[in-house]
Image (spheres, rainbow, N blue to C red):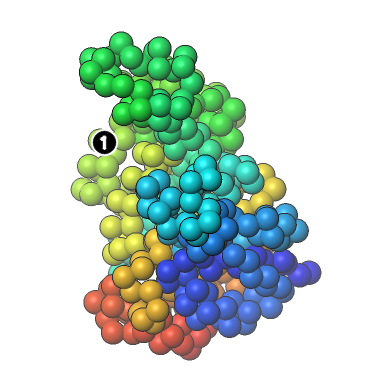
Amino acid sequence: MSHRIVLLPGDGIGPEIVDASRPLLGRIFPSWEFTEAEIGWGCWCRDGDPVPAATWAALESADAALLAAITSKPARAAESELAPELRGTGLRYRSPVLQLRQRLDLFANVRPIDDLLSDDPAFGFTVVRENTEGLYSHDLNMGDGPAGLWDVVKRDATVRRSVPAETAVALRVTTRFGWLRLLRTAAGLGRRVLVADKPNILRESGAIIESTVAEVAAEFPDVEFTVANADAIAMELVNDPGKFDVIAAENLLGDILSDLGAGLMGGLGLPASANVGAKFAVFEPVHGSAPDIAGRGVANPAAFLLAAAMCGEHLGLSDGAARLRSAVRTALRARPTRDLGGTATTAEFAAAVAEAL
């Protein structure tokens, strides 16, 4: 059985990581048929759209996608770097990662946080965060935002001293539907699910989350569900990461906690993630496009390879996924890249993975 995989090299170090990894992936997963498609900052600057129509078409006919790296910049930079003929036309940059998550309904971001560098691993847990709601879903400038929302916030002490054009509001969208499917996903990842939130402060949205936790806990009597303050969880992650199994959170809090986990692992060059929906999934490293080292051949491809292992497992290729993970672990010890204190180039690290297979 063949699997159609869309490769999305993206920006910065993305293309060189894909080039170094592609022969390995073809060797480990011979059933994969690759199609390469454009995405990212270059597409935005050239065409005013970071996700071209041809890329959406490729994704619609694929089984999964592997995304390497994306550059995102603030609104002013996005406008200024557009092709001259596109400036002033009303185009607005919208993160291609958020577009993928929302249009493809990739509701869960799953990030394994594993101690890859130790002979005797001290921790191994997973952060699963809601991908389509939360504070990332609506970030509105009141200068052109809905008047009704301005009427709500204009009574606040600081807003009374401001004007709509100088005021922005981020909405934390929280639904029972969204949390039902997130928590059901989390229940399939371990035996202890810790929900990270701020119910003592965010009382209304927190109440929806807590009631949904109770509902899902009744569906999975063999899984222990607990709700705790996210800031307390962050402290405990630093003090004793080995105590955790699965952490579930809304978008922003999950993003922060999973990046804390990346620090525990040794840096952003190591963790991978899966953006999972009911019908499709996109797999990617957690790191960004690292434009400061792009083109120098020194980027660490480990996270991209581990993302590919997650993709393999998702498609039922568990043996190949396990082989790839084991080979990456071996290469991390034998030929670490510069971000981990070693000297290996991107190509040398990929060769070390190939030798370990």
Residue type at numbered disc 1:
Asp
Q: Residue at x 30, y 51 (%)?
A: 260
Q: Which residue is mark 1?
A: 231
Residue 160 seen in the current view:
yes
Disc 1 packing (10 Å; few <14; some 14–19; many ≥20): some
Q: Residue at x 36, y 66 (%)?
A: 290
- List x then y, in percent, for residue 318: 61, 66
Considering only vertical position in the picture, is 14 above or below 201? below
Residue 188 seen in the current view:
no
- List x then y, in percent, for residue 109: 50, 47
- List x then y, in percent, for residue 209: 46, 25
Whether residue 173 sits left or right of residue 7 in the image: it is: left
Whether residue 142 sits left or right of residue 159 in the image: it is: right
Residue reaching furthest right? 1
Between residue 255 and residue 190, name the one nearer to us.
255
- List x then y, in percent, for residue 123: 33, 56
Q: How many marks do you count on the picture?
A: 1
Q: Residue at x 28, y 72 (%)?
A: 339
Between residue 194 and residue 128, name the one nearer to us.
128
Query: The residue tagged with tag 1: helix, strand or loop?
Result: helix
Q: Residue at x 53, y 68 (%)?
A: 9
Whether residue 52 sits left or right of residue 80 in the image: it is: right
Considering only vertical position in the picture, is 231 above or below 267? above
Between residue 138 and residue 192, name the one nearer to us.
138
Quarter of the rendering occupied by the N terminus: bottom right
